[in-house]
Image (cartoon, coloured by chain):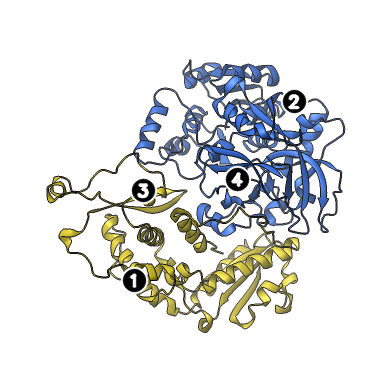
Amino acid sequence: MQGRLMAAERMRRGRASAKAPAGLRHRGRALRGAPSTPPTNIIEAVLPQARDVIRRVREEDTGPLGRLLRSRPATRRPTSMRRPVSMRRMELMGRQVLVIRMARRRSGPAGMRGRALSPMPGRVPRGLSAIGRSRATPVVGAALMAAGIAVSRRLIARSGEAGRRDFGNRWSMVTVNCPPERLASRSDLPEPLARLGDAVEIRVSRAPGDRGTELGARLLEERRGRGGMMALLGGEDPRRAVRRALREAKALIEVGEVIRRGEVTPERPPRPAEKVMELAGRRGGRQ
Amino acid sequence: MKALCWEGVDKLDVQRVPDPQIVNDQDAIVKVTLSTTCGSDLHLINGFVPTMRPGDVMGHEFMGEIVEAGPGVRHRRVGDRVVVCSFIGCGRCWYCTHDQWSLCDNSNPNWELAQEVFGFELGGVYAYSHALGGFKGSHAEYIRVPFADYGTFLVPDDVDDLDALFASDAAPTGWMGADLGGVQPGDVVAVWGAGGVGQMAARAAELLGAEQVIVIDRLPERLAMTERHTGAETIDFSTTDVDAELRERTGGRGPDVCIEAVGMEAVGGNGQHAAEKIRRRLGRPQERPIALRQAIHACRKGGSVFILGVFGGSVDRFPLGAVMNKGMTVRGAQQHGHRYIPMLLERIAAGELSTSHLATHEFSLEGAPKGYQMFKNKQDGCVRAVFRPHG
């Protein structure tokens, strides 16, 4: 019990000492306009953020996604010309995702007046393939879905616990199955963590019960670089490198090696749905 | 080498793929002697599990001979006849040292993706999507086995290959359902599913002291096999009301422990299957927890339900009210095989546990697509199709 209290106190102090990171402002901008309580209308809740993400990718991203978006007309079509959108939230593998469908293009105005939303053609698609089967541009669809995942996660987090908004520069944590003495000094850190040098701060503490040693790392403020959605899309999020270094350090301490996948399936261009899954994977790593 | 590859939903093909290599020091290369189909493979074939990629080699339940060992392998040698656990465990993380091997911290190289899917990552497993490691499977001539000192088990001389084969997955999975389901001497245990895992769960319950074991399925040949090899009673759910039948057989109490060994593609009676099909057409989640719902409903007050069948994501219409109001314990896990395999091999050697009867059909690797077709469609009484990659 005493150990648990100490651990709780440790965590409380750790969070309290976290400075408000610059990245929060960055993310806060993305969430501008979001209501303070979870809205019931998912379209109203997500569309502004989704548009903002696409706008930022169009304006700032130097990668292929940004180039592709910039090649499309930036101006919005008049309302009367826009195809109606249906959006709904569904669960995929335990996650809230947003499925966006553009209505079928009608031959004339009479068709548009007939029904606001046309039914989806053919069989109702499965899971992520909904994007591919809709009339939305796959890239835009992927971006919207990524935004949907991010915003849905945030809405869920907000509805559950208001205090979880300080997600900017959390400690990444792993628990290593070894005594704390094994990590008594910085020179004891395995190479993946040691390689990060002064870019990270490290903390080590005894885990409650027989659970070993809690090992944490986080980037120092000035080394954080770009984070958020841009880094996520570009695969450059430095926090991801910290998470991977922690995992590899844990594996090296516990088993002496980091398991590798070995021979991989022959390369082919990823499908849009797989690309979204990969993006979701980059968001993983919550230690 | 030749291997059976997943090429898309309902598409399997035997192809030439690169030979496996020692990637980590603690790897071994196993020449596959026998490899078998598993009901959970059908979830991959039917497209229920995302993150599969064309070219992925199928198969996770196998045995064979070590033909190469990495420099970090201390307790196995070339020539050892071994059965290999389908889950990969490092043996030294907190979960492995606490006998929860399928939750291993260090055996899934795709942990980031798995964390996003489940909240925390699982251990790696052979041929079960890239979220669970992306490892090549055993329906091949050779396979790479990471952490070989922990994941391979020497087969006693008096246990033949076919018996040892099912100690890889079906037997330990079934045993775990009875063990962690909390079967006590004198209990009444009901098992949904008379496939390989269900039959093993039924036999495990008997060996753990259950006084009455009842297995529920709809296929007469499987029900007959279950009665013949495990001694359990059976119920054909296609001809009777399972709930009423269980009450009648248990003095109105309901089973003490219910083990669900079916998974997300259950077939139900009373229009449930049709309802699930409609939900599928409407784009709702496709997992069909029909057997699980029935188990929770039938279980006695304060009883225990263990989920052995594989589920991938979320299911709707989960009877949470029954769980809460009846004071039930619901538990599930992928198999912690390392915990049980040595004991199971001893029981097989002692004649307490029979497994080879599950192998109803044998094929070469070239015949594997046909084997899966028969297994999937339950043709010719197929319970398990077994492949011999080296003839």
- Using the numbered discs, state the Cα–Cα distance from disc 2 to disc 1 in whole angstroms: 66 Å
Helix, strand or loop status at disc 3: helix
Name the amino acid, label 4: Tyr
Palette colour of chain A? yellow
Task: Check residue A70 in the rendering and tell me which mark sits there, or answer none.
Answer: 1
The location of residue A123, given as percent across then percent down, is 35, 39
Crowding near pointer 4: few (<14 within 10 Å), some, many (20+)?
many
The location of residue B133, given as percent across then percent down, is 62, 52
The structure residue drawn at horizontal position 39% and vertical position 32%, both measured from the top left corner, is B277
The location of residue A228, given as percent across then percent down, is 44, 71
- Using the numbered discs, state the Cα–Cα distance from disc 4 to disc 2 in whole angstroms: 27 Å
The structure residue drawn at horizontal position 70% and vertical position 20%, both measured from the top left corner, is B229
Residue under label 4, please give it: B128
- Using the numbered discs, state the Cα–Cα distance from disc 3 to disc 4 in whole angstroms: 26 Å
Q: Nearer the viewer, residue B124 or B297?
A: B124
Subunit that carries the residue with mark 4: B
Task: Give yes or no for contact between labels 3 and 2 (Cβ–Cβ under 8 Å).
Answer: no
- Using the numbered discs, state the Cα–Cα distance from disc 1 to disc 4 in whole angstroms: 39 Å
Palette colour of chain B? blue
Residue under label 3, please give it: A133
